Amino acid sequence: MQTLIQSVLTLQGDTLQSVDLLLIGSHIHTVAPAGTIPVAPHPRVIDGTDKLLLPGFVNGHTHSSQVWQRGLIPQLPLELWLANVFGSTPQQLEHLYWGAVSTAVDTLLSGGTCLMDHAYVIPGQELETVDALVRGYRAVGIRAVVAPLIMDLPFASGFPAGCLLPQSASPQSPTQLLTLMEALIAEFHDPDHGIYIGLGPTGFHRCSDELLQGCGELSDRYQLCYHTHLLETRAQHRLAQERYGISAVQHLHNLGCLGPRTSLAHCVWINDDDIAVFAETGATLVHNPVSNLRLGSGLAPVLKSLQAGVNVSFGCDGAASNDAQNLLEAIKLGTILHTVTDHDYDNWLTPEQAVQMAAAGGAQGVNLGDRIGTIAPGMEADLVLYNLNHPSLLPRTNPLQLLILGRPTEVVEAVWIRGRQIVDHGQVLTVDTEALHQVLRHQSLDTEDLQTQHHPIEPHYREVMLDR
């Protein structure tokens, strides 16, 4: 299949230019000045006038199951918020399938063509859970990395002085979890069809060194993305000092867990030495500005990280800590938030830099930088076409600035993933979105007594984090 997009505005380097773009099969074949590729013999021609074409963005960190918890969890710090999340996480495979579909659709319609699902898996139904997620992502046609959340330490271990809390039974052993991951890789890892399995230990705070290191070894063996939460909160920063006596980043580095296939969500409480380790190892910082503010976690040192040469991408995080899955919203907030962290305005992020972070930076973060993230011959055709005539992108000033810093709504005109068009005139072609909305409208979770879920641990949290 050949598709010619004529005279479309796109970003080449840091400059907007009008080009012709020829897609053949799953790849970009030619990028040429506007009007220089003849229409014949290409069977499909799209007029790119008044349109903006960008590489698809990557939602570098989310949890698809949390679609069902949108608007549900009160404003609390992460450690108390988690108790509510655990108490209301869906346990039905159908819920998890539709959570994947919903997350994929929202990602597509906000400029994304790929996502990293740090996925909750139902205990005892791990293979069935991943099967449900993969079916959802394949139905939509989005490119997806599924990194099951695994941990081998109890909930209380994630708190400073957690030994003083009642201890629940430990989950599966590291050996059992690593065996499970090998089975999931063998069953579901399918790069040729845009589905990837990643290693997703939840974080150092609830994972033993044996599990963290074992995930790193599997990542190396199978050349897979290694994805984990890292230093999201002040409590985690204190816990690392309590447990290791050194930075959590240095500890992970000592274990051999950091490298160019590693992506680390949040990183709010990293320091200058940690940033230097990221730059040295090629690890990616995934910036989740909406959830970091929603949970009161703080601001990740994004400008310092970029200046040190660290790869930075964007994530929405799950809908329980974001209450949405709008990638453009996360990119806007993540772009303007850091003006307050550096008085030198020459260091502030530009819309062009934000696009690079969301696309090429995101692709690198999910170990796909050689395939997607830029518009160039030979790259796979993961592309998003925006309608510049939409009122939210008017008046006709700087379209890129309006897209990144404005409030664009319903501006995604078309989406291609691996050369296959799956959105046309703003409508998803692959799944019945009205059926999705009906499911979300009429199915619900049992949330009785949710508001009291955090109370058993709140006194401990207040004592160790607020009252000392």
Image: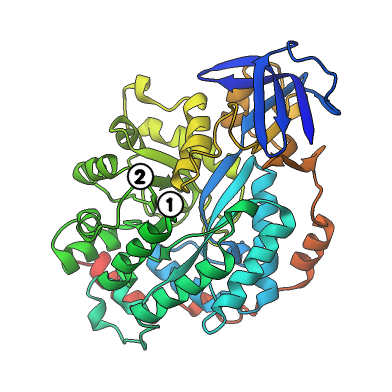
Task: Tell me the element at label 2.
Answer: loop
Q: Position of residue 266 (x, y in %)?
A: 39, 51
- Counting residues from the N terminus, which is met first, the one under dot 2 or under dot 1? 1
Q: Nearer the viewer, residue 388 or 12?
A: 12
Q: Is residue 60 above or below residue 45?
A: below
- Gap between marks 2 and 1, in whole Å? 8 Å
Q: Residue at 39%, 30% (x, y): give it.
A: 339
Identity, as a three-letter code, of the amino acid under mark 2: Ala
Q: Give the quadrant of residue 277.
A: top left
Task: Tell me the element at label 1.
Answer: helix
Point out the residue furthest to the left here: 245
> Which residue in the protein does label 1 denote?
292
Q: Nearer the viewer, residue 387 or 176?
A: 176
Q: Residue at 86%, 28% (x, y): give it.
A: 43
Disc 1 crowd rating (10 Å Cα; few below 14, some 14-19, many 20+) is: many
Task: Give the left or right position of residue 162, taking residue 324 as reference.
Answer: left
Q: Are marks 2 and 1 in contact (CB under 8 Å)?
A: yes
Q: Residue at 81%, 64% (x, y): give it.
A: 438
Q: Nearer the viewer, residue 240 or 294?
A: 240
Q: Quadrant of the C terminus?
A: bottom left
Q: Is residue 427 above or below residue 1?
A: below
Q: Residue at 41%, 70% (x, y): give it.
A: 80
Task: Give the left or right position of residue 438, taking residue 282 as reference.
Answer: right
Q: Give the quadrant of residue 273.
A: top left
Residue 90 visible to an observer of this rendering = no
